Amino acid sequence: MINIDTFLEIGDQHKVCEDYIVSGVDPVPYIILSDGCSTANNSEMGSRLLCHLAKQYLKYNADQVIDYWNLGHWVIYNAEQTIRQLGLSRTCLTATLIVAYQIEDNVRIMMYGDGSYITVAKSGIINITTVEYTNNAPYYLVYLIDQYREDLYHKAGNMKTVTTYYEDGSESKEEFAYDHALEYGVNTKVYPNLLIASDGIDSFLKKDGSSTIHLRAENIIHPCVAFKNMKGEFLKRRLNKQMKVYNKEGITHFDDLSVGAFIDEVVQWTLLM
């Protein structure tokens, strides 16, 4: 049985939370998150629109193999129609999007922009795959409907880098064109715990006397996935508790943080016994 839960918290350097996350089980278990660009006006509205439109797309298409670009185009074109009715500029749609949904024993992950997904194997080994872009400038879906900004982005020569951090401290890197489709499949019987996260997962800072140390996901993730109870709001309980611990240790995240988790309760329980 797959349980899902989400966590959302504003960054300590933000006045408005521009991340957003939704989840559900109809028609399939899914988690969808978006991270609005902090330099774009009303991007918190854009991130919400992208999430709910992606949810609508899943509602009518989850019974078939979903094409990465069909989903992306449908979401952003419908988002543009919506913001016109609201009198908002299309720049509010400057937001990333991660869509993850379960089909049988597999979770498919589609990433439009930066962010991470984290797998916890039956053995307890944790691997983290992170997508980053040149100059911290993600390729947003809104560029598909904004030719001027698309051209500027193309001329800048941006690339995307996918880095996987392994439990043993090693890592692997791959570089792709900025518009390369990124989709992954994760078997929940092999990896009973799977998380997706916005780039806020890499924004933790630790105050150490007069200096500040930057902590990435691999530095803070282990206690965040130490679930003792997989029922109900298992992720909220764990992360709310862990954030209090981190705050006492002088550790905070400066960027907004959204995290969603799929957990195969049967496999996880077997692992803990």
Image (cartoon, rainbow, N blue to C red):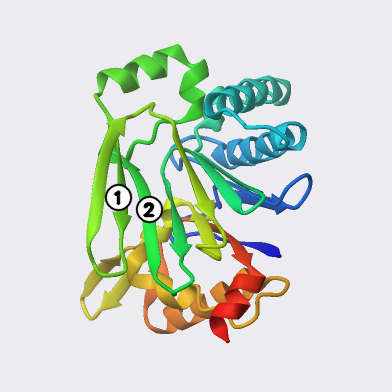
Dots 1, 2 in contact, CB < 8 A: yes
Element at badge 1? strand
Q: Nearer the viewer, residue 200 or 225?
A: 225
Label 2 element class: strand
Nearer-the-camera pick, 175 or 138 = 175
Q: Read off the residue under disc 1.
A: 163
Where residue 174 sits: x, y (%)? 26, 41
Quarter of the rendering containing residue 213: bottom left
Q: Position of residue 200 (x, y in %)?
A: 43, 56
| Quarter placement of the N terminus | bottom right
Which of the two residues, 182 or 189, is positioned nearer the viewer here? 189
Mark 1 residue crowding within 10 angstroms, few (<14) / some (14–19) / many (20+): some
Residue 224 point in image, percent of width and height: 48, 73
Q: Is residue 201 above or below residue 42?
A: below
Quadrant placement of the C terminus: bottom right
Q: Which residue is mark 2?
A: 129
> Which residue does the image show at 32% across and 63% down from the upper left?
216
Q: Is residue 34 visible to the viewer in this orientation of the structure?
A: no
The answer to whether any part of residue 172 appears in the image is yes
> Of callouts 1 and 2, which one flags the residue occurring earlier in the amino acid sequence?
2
Question: Residue at 39% of width from left, 26% of height from top?
Answer: 179
Picture coordinates of residue 62, whole percent (x, y)? 71, 37
Amino acid type shown at disc 1: Thr
